[in-house]
Structure formats: structure tokens, C-alpha cells
């Protein structure tokens, strides 16, 4: 994340014409757009069986587009090999790209999307919009299908995968990678100094004072992208007030952001700032700059997700043991210390208008096999939503501590969706967190700013409101 | 004209005109059309919504904030660039110590020209990254440690909502001054030396020569630069997107129209609404260019 999109006004307009020329298929623009592309579903044809539950036509080509980001695309090539083994006559087109939106937007507009897309990265297509305009194939049959290793696929997955893919009762997205969030530290350094991640807020403040006394800033954050500091603040709020806090926020309920737990967490963040525990100037650093300073032991803790170790591989010292700690508990917290936000990422979709929808679904079924999932973990050091697929692999310190936290948290782990569901609200919330982390607003002003953004979103006729079950 | 000559000319023009129509005119026309729809940008289906997008725009506080910031840049940037470029160009041309005979530039003017022009060969994102590093907000940042050496406190620069927009403005100016310096320099060298020398003999000092001779004779060039810089100030997307927190932050201090267009069009799935912003920006640019050309019109001096 964090790589800004290089668009200019001119580029935007140019792109608009390309899009519409494609949409019109060279014909008249207006009629072309209104009637949409002609491409329909030519899928099916093959017979369904236990081996082939979606009835894939054995020789139908498969068009796969993968976001080639932090995880690379080698894992996808492996999955394609597995598919090829099953359907030797199928021709597979593979593309590993980063500019998903630029390349696929015209194809969606002309009704000619690929069969499988890993819609991720800074330039992903707006997922909620795709879902609401009926452009995604229903993956519910996939989740109810038999897994390659036996058992219903749904039962082999971490529940967050089902929750995250659910758009109004239908599962439209397969979020493949499991991401664990928390406060990250160097275990080598902490062991040397005899420090322990604190379990309670008071202990955290004591530890921070000690770290500060050692000449290290207790905390840094990726200030240019306030998403990160938002993460740990929200975690503390959820642990204090329970998952209901964030369910209300996801559902855009009135006064959800004014919940006492949210305010308390905001005050905790202000306390870190006002006591000088924050790396000075960190609010102007981007993720690479701040994380590199953290690698250089200029800061002890940094908020992030389980991709952090991989992201910093090139700059981290040899003996740096990237390890995750859950956020500390404020007084009266409802959830245990050993619990955290766990999300499912790398959003795989099968477009409704794809030429080979069954092939796309079968490809995802292959990904969800033990073999497919453990290869992903092996190649990327990141866990997948397939339960236990990473077992027996030799894990890095980050991956090991993250999987331990997932296990320890169990049913107490949670996720939230307002950033994905309501993209126009996202920058507003992030701005509010940025101001809070810089200590320029009070906790009350912060809650009011977030609530205002949520209320505006709830009133906006163009935004589809969603609710958590 | 002889028979067939028109056909000959048209033959040459048809390709560039067709390209211009397809890649310039038609996107504009389409943006106008899309601005009246609720097109998401990722679906072939959308509805016609009339002027609703423009109505929403008038109440969109972020968009209005972006317009305000663009106005600050629109006033500050051309003014600073033209003043600085004129001043330097004047120094390079006639600022040299008088050696009794004639008028010449300061010593090493060739080197200065090169040094000032250098940013022009860097791409905008590179400039943005360089300045983001120079303006590092931590105490060990380049500018901050330099300031501490001379006894000033540091600053958050781009992370400070009161300064961020001016930092962007400064980088814009830094990146543009070189080009206009070279442009004005070329225009000044085409002013005959004897005019300066005559002015000097008549007892005009440096300041008087600058205002009474140089500026009037450069007016056409300045006018063109002004319009061009104004258009540049309305589109600072790359700088803001790369340099500022958010981007557009902190606290929306560096929010600009082009950033809002990109966010709405590509991240929020609101291409129709973004097109409406584009249409507003189009007219904005057109009106400003027209006003500037009209307001700065003067009689042309021949020499």
C-alpha cells in the first residue's frame, strides 16, 4: 500500500476516452454505453461431477490476472499448473500486473473481463461498486462445494473469509490471505533489554517510559498514511467495548463513533503523543521511511500487518526478529489481551460476465486445496484463510508469532469493513486519525469528526448502506 | 490557388486533425456527457441524472476546500515564478558590474542558467520525492538539522497543516523558475543592447532600466507565461499525490481539484461525479485564461 497513483487530469480524460471507445466497440458512444458490451457468459457445457462440481469445459481457456505486489505471482503460476494438470487442454493466460484498474477497467466496461482476478493493491477496482452493480459471479456455490481434500469448503476456512466475502447474503469475493494486525517489535532487541510487550495500558506507559529513557522512541507510525495508527487505536477500542463497537461503525449507526470505548482509545493515543512517546516527526513519514527507522531501532513499536516482515526484508538487520504483539488492554476491557484484528485480504473475484465462470470457480477451488494454500504460505511467508494449511512449514518469526496470535485469539478475533464498504468515507476517517495522532484535536473533536463523516455517508444516496450480522 | 492544392493540404492535415479529434476533442465531449450521469467507471450500465452531480458539488466541502487551495496556488505560483525569473534573467543579462563600456550579465551567468534550468529536466514525481526527503519532518531531516545548526527550531513542514500548502507552492516555484528564467533570458537577449546603453547614458539606474525598458519590451512573453503558469497551478496532481500525507493532507490542507477527480473517479467508483469536477475545472481554466489575457492586454512595442 501507499504507492500513490500517478494520475493527471489529462491522463484521466484520455483514459475516459479509451474506456468509452472500448465500451462502444467503435460504434456510437451513447448507444454503446447505454446498451453495454455484448459479451455474455458462454460458460458451462461441461458435465458436472464430484471431480468437476462446476461443470468446467475441459478445453475452455482460462484468463487469470494477478496483482503482483508484496506476494509476487509465483504462487499463482503454481495454481495454474495445478489447473493445467486437471484440464490439460485448457489454455491458460496469465498476467501478473500492478495496475489492475488501468488494465481491467476498459475490459469491464466492454463486458469482456478476465475469468479470475486478484483485485488488490493501491490501484484496485472499487470492490463495493463492482458488487453493487452485479458484476461479480456468486461464489456461494464454491463455498458450499466439496473441497479437494474432502469436506465442505466453507468448513475448511477461517470464518473471516466468509464474512469478508459476503455482500448482502451472497459471497462474491474470496479473500485468500490471512492478515494479522498489531504492534510490531524486534524480539531480539526486547530480549536484550529485558523488555516485554505490555498487557495493560498502565504497564504500557511504564514500559514506554523505560524505552524512552533508553533513548529510543517507544512508538513510530506511518504518518503519511494514517490508516496504520487508526488500526491500533481501533483495536484498543474494540478490545475495550467488544466487537459491537465496530459493528455499529460498520453499520453507520448514529453516534457509533461517540462510543465511550472509541473516545477512551482516542485519549490513549493522545496520551502517547503528549508524553513524547511518539517518534518526533513521524506524522510526516511514509511507510518505508518510518518502518526503516523502526528497523534501525529508532522506535520500539510500530503498527502494521503481517506483511511487514516481507516488506522490510531488504533493510532489516540480519538478527532482527519481527514479532507481533496484541494491543494493550485499557481498564475494563471486554476482550482478552490475546486477541486482535484478523482480516482476509487479496480479493479474488470471478466476474459475472467472464467467458469461463466455471473455470474461474474451479481455479479458486484449487487455490483452496491444502496443496495450493500451503504453497502460497511457503512462497510468501503469509498464512491463508485455509485452516491449518501452513502447518509443518518452517515459519519466519513474524509468520510464527502471527499464526500463534490467530490461534490464541480464536473466536475473539474480529474484523471490520467500513473502509471497503464505504470508500468515500475512508479519507475522511483517515484525516481525523491523522489529526488525532498529531495531537491537534481533542478526543471529543476526533469522535465528532468521524461521526460527521459517517453521518454524511449514511445520508449519501450514492452509497449503499450495509449492516453487520 | 491551383486545382488540387486544397486536396493536397487536406491530405496533410487529415491525420493530425483526426488524432486531435479522437484524443483531445472527443474526451472533452464525453466528459461533458458523463458528468450528467451516475457512471461508476467500472460498469457499462448507468443512468442519466441531469445536473445532480453539479448540485452535489456545490455542497461538497472537500471539493470547495480543494478549489480554495487551488486559488491560493493560482495567485501565488505565477506571481512568484514570474518575479523571480524576471529578476534572475535581468541579473544574468545586464546585472554585471559595469566595466566602463557596454552592458553585460553577472560573471558565470552560463553556469547559473544551467543550474536554474536543471529541475526542468527532472520529472515531477522525482522532484516530489527529492523535496519530501529534504523536508523530512524528523529532527534529523535535512532542512530541520540545518535550521537547528543556525539556532532555529525545526518544523513539520509537509506534516504541518499551516505550512503544507506553502511547501507545495515552494516546490512548484522551484521546479518552474528555471524554465521561465531561460525563456525571459532569451527574450531579453533579443532586446537591442543600444536601448540599455542609451538608457544608462540618460542616467537611468538598474531599477529604472528594469521597469521602464525591460518589462515593457518583454510584456508579450510575460503574458503568455502568466496564462501557462496559471494552468499549471490548477493541476498539481503529481506533486500533491507523491509529497503530501494522505495524500491531500494533513487535515486536507493540500487538497486540490485534480486529486478529488482521481479519488472520486478511480477509488470511489464515481466517474460521473469526477467528470462533473473535470467539467468545472475545464471552465475554470478557460475563464481564468480569458480574464488574464484580457486584463494584461497592452499595446505592443515594436523595436
Image (cartoon, coloured by chain):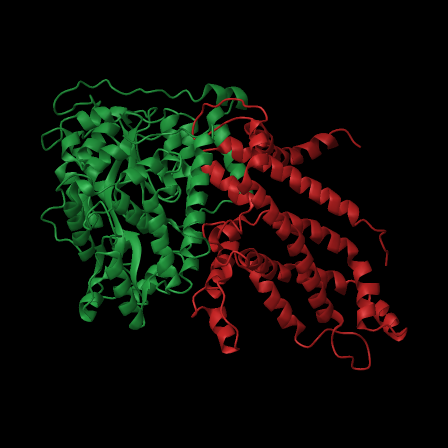
Residue in view at x 43 percent, y 57 percent? A439
Q: Is A402 left, or right, of A33 in this rendering?
A: left
Chain shown in green: A
**Above or below, B82 relative to A336:** below
Residue in view at x 69 percent, y 57 percent? B79
Q: How many marks?
A: 0
Quadrant (top left/top right/bottom left/bottom right) for the C terminus of chain A: top left
Q: Is B162 left, or right, of B218 in this rendering?
A: left
Q: Colour of chain B?
A: red
Residue in view at x 47 percent, y 47 percent? A6
Question: Residue A48's x, y, as percent?
Answer: 16, 19
Question: Residue A388's x, y, as percent?
Answer: 12, 42
Question: Residue A279's x, y, as percent?
Answer: 37, 64
Residue nearer the viewer, A341 or B21: A341
Query: Quarter of the image holding residue B275?
Result: top right
Q: Is B300 left, or right, of A379 in this rendering?
A: right
**Above or below, B137 relative to B123:** below
Residue in view at x 68 percent, y 63 percent? B85
**Above or below, A78 relative to B217:** above
Residue nearer the viewer, B210 or A155: A155
Query: Quarter of the image holding residue A375?
Result: top left
Residue B47 visible in image: yes
Amino acid at each position: 500500500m501507499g504507492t500513490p497513483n500517478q494520475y493527471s487530469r489529462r491522463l484521466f480524460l484520455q483514459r475516459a476516452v479509451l474506456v468509452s471507445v472500448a465500451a462502444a466497440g467503435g460504434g456510437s458512444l451513447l448507444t454503446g454505453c447505454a446498451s453495454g458490451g455484448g459479451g455474455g457468459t458462454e460458460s458451462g457445457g461441461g458435465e458436472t461431477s464430484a471431480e468437476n462440481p462446476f461443470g468446467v469445459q475441459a478445453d475452455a481457456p482460462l484468463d487469470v490476472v494477478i496483482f503482483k505486489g508484496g506476494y509476487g505471482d509465483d504462487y499463482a503460476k503454481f495454481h495454474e499448473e495445478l489447473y493445467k494438470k486437471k484440464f490439460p487442454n485448457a489454455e491458460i493466460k496469465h498476467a501478473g500486473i500492478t495496475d489492475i484498474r488501468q488494465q481491467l477497467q476498459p475490459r469491464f466496461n466492454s463486458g469482456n473481463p478476465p475469468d479470475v482476478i486478484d483485485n488488490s493493491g493501491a490501484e484496485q477496482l472499487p470492490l463495493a461498486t463492482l458488487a453493487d452493480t452485479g458484476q461479480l459471479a456468486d461464489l456461494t456455490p464454491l463455498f458450499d462445494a466439496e473441497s479437494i481434500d474432502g469436506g465442505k469448503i466453507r468448513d475448511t476456512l477461517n470464518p473471516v473469509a466468509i464474512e469478508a466475502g459476503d455482500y448482502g447474503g451472497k459471497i462474491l469475493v474470496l479473500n485468500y490471505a490471512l492478515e494479522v494486525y498489531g504492534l510490531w517489535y524486534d524480539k531480539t532487541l526486547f530480549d536484550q533489554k529485558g523488555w516485554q510487550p505490555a498487557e495493560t495500558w498502565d504497564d504500557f506507559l511504564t514500559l514506554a517510559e523505560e524505552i524512552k529513557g533508553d533513548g529510543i522512541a517507544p512508538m513510530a507510525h506511518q504518518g503519511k498514511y494514517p490508516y496504520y495508527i487508526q488500526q491500533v487505536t481501533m483495536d484498543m477500542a474494540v478490545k475495550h467495548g467488544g466487537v459491537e463497537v465496530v459493528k455499529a461503525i460498520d453499520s453507520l449507526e448514529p453516534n457509533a463513533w461517540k462510543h465511550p470505548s472509541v473516545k477512551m482509545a482516542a485519549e490513549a493515543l493522545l496520551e502517547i503523543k503528549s508524553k513524547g512517546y511518539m517518534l518526533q516527526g513521524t506524522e510526516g513519514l511514509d511507510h518505508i521511511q518510518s518502518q526503516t527507522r523502526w528497523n534501525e531501532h529508532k522506535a520500539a513499536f510500530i503498527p502494521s500487518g503481517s506483511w511487514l516482515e516481507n516488506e522490510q526484508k531488504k533493510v532489516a538487520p540480519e538478527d532482527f526478529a519481527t514479532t507481533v504483539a496484541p494491543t494493550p488492554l485499557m481498564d475494563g476491557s471486554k476482550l482478552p489481551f490475546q486477541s486482535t484484528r484478523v482480516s482476509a485480504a487479496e480479493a479474488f473475484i470471478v466476474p459475472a460476465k467472464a467467458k469461463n465462470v466455471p473455470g474461474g470457480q474451479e481455479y479458486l477451488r484449487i487455490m483452496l486445496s491444502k496443496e495450493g494454500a500451503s504453497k502460497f504460505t511457503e512462497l510468501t511467508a503469509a498464512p491463508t484463510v485455509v485452516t491449518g494449511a501452513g502447518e509443518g512449514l518452517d515459519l519466519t518469526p513474524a509468520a510464527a508469532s502471527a499464526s500463534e496470535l490467530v490461534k490464541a485469539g480464536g473466536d475473539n478475533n474480529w474484523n471490520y469493513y467500513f473502509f471497503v464498504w464505504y470508500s468515500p468515507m475512508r479519507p475522511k476517517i483517515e484525516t481525523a486519525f491523522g489529526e488525532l495522532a498529531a495531537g491537534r484535536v481533542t478526543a471529543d473533536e476526533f469522535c465528532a469528526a468521524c461521526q460527521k463523516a459517517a453521518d454524511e455517508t449514511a445520508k449519501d444516496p450514492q452509497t449503499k448502506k450495509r449492516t453487520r450480522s | 490557388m491551383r486545382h488540387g492544392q486544397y486536396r493536397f493540404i487536406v491530405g496533410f492535415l487529415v491525420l493530425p486533425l483526426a488524432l486531435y479529434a479522437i484524443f483531445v476533442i472527443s474526451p472533452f465531449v464525453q466528459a461533458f456527457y458523463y458528468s450528467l450521469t451516475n457512471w461508476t467507471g467500472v460498469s457499462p450500465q448507468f443512468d442519466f441524472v441531469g445536473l445532480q452531480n453539479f448540485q452535489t458539488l456545490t455542497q461538497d466541502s472537500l471539493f470547495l476546500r480543494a478549489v480554495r487551495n487551488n486559488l491560493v496556488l493560482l495567485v501565488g505560483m505565477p506571481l512568484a515564478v514570474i518575479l523571480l525569473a524576471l529578476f534572475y534573467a535581468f541579473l544574468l543579462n545586464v546585472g554585471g558590474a559595469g566595466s566602463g563600456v557596454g552592458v553585460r550579465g553577472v560573471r558565470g551567468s552560463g553556469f547559473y542558467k544551467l543550474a536554474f534550468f536543471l529541475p526542468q529536466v527532472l520529472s515531477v514525481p522525482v522532484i516530489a520525492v527529492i523535496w519530501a526527503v529534504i523536508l523530512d519532518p524528523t529532527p534529523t531531516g535535512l532542512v530541520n538539522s540545518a535550521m537547528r545548526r543556525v539556532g532555529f527550531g525545526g518544523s513539520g513542514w509537509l506534516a504541518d497543516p499551516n505550512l503544507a500548502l506553502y511547501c507545495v507552492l515552494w516546490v512548484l516555484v522551484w521546479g518552474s523558475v528555471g524554465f521561465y528564467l531561460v525563456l525571459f533570458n532569451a527574450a531579453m537577449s533579443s532586446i537591442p543592447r543600444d536601448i540599455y546603453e542609451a538608457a544608462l547614458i540618460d542616467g537611468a539606474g538598474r531599477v529604472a532600466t528594469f521597469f521602464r525598458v525591460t518589462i515593457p519590451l518583454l510584456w508579450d512573453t510575460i503574458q503568455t507565461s502568466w496564462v501557462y503558469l496559471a494552468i499549471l497551478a490548477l493541476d498539481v496532481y503529481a506533486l500533491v499525490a507523491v509529497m503530501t500525507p494522505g495524500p491531500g493532507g494533513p487535515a486536507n490542507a493540500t487538497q486540490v481539484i485534480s486529486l478529488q477527480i482521481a479519488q472520486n473517479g478511480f477509488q470511489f467508483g464515481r466517474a460521473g461525479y469526477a467528470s462533473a469536477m473535470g467539467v468545472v475545472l475545464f471552465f475554470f481554466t478557460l475563464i481564468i485564461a480569458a480574464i488574464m489575457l484580457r486584463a494584461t492586454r497592452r499595446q505592443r512595442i515594436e523595436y
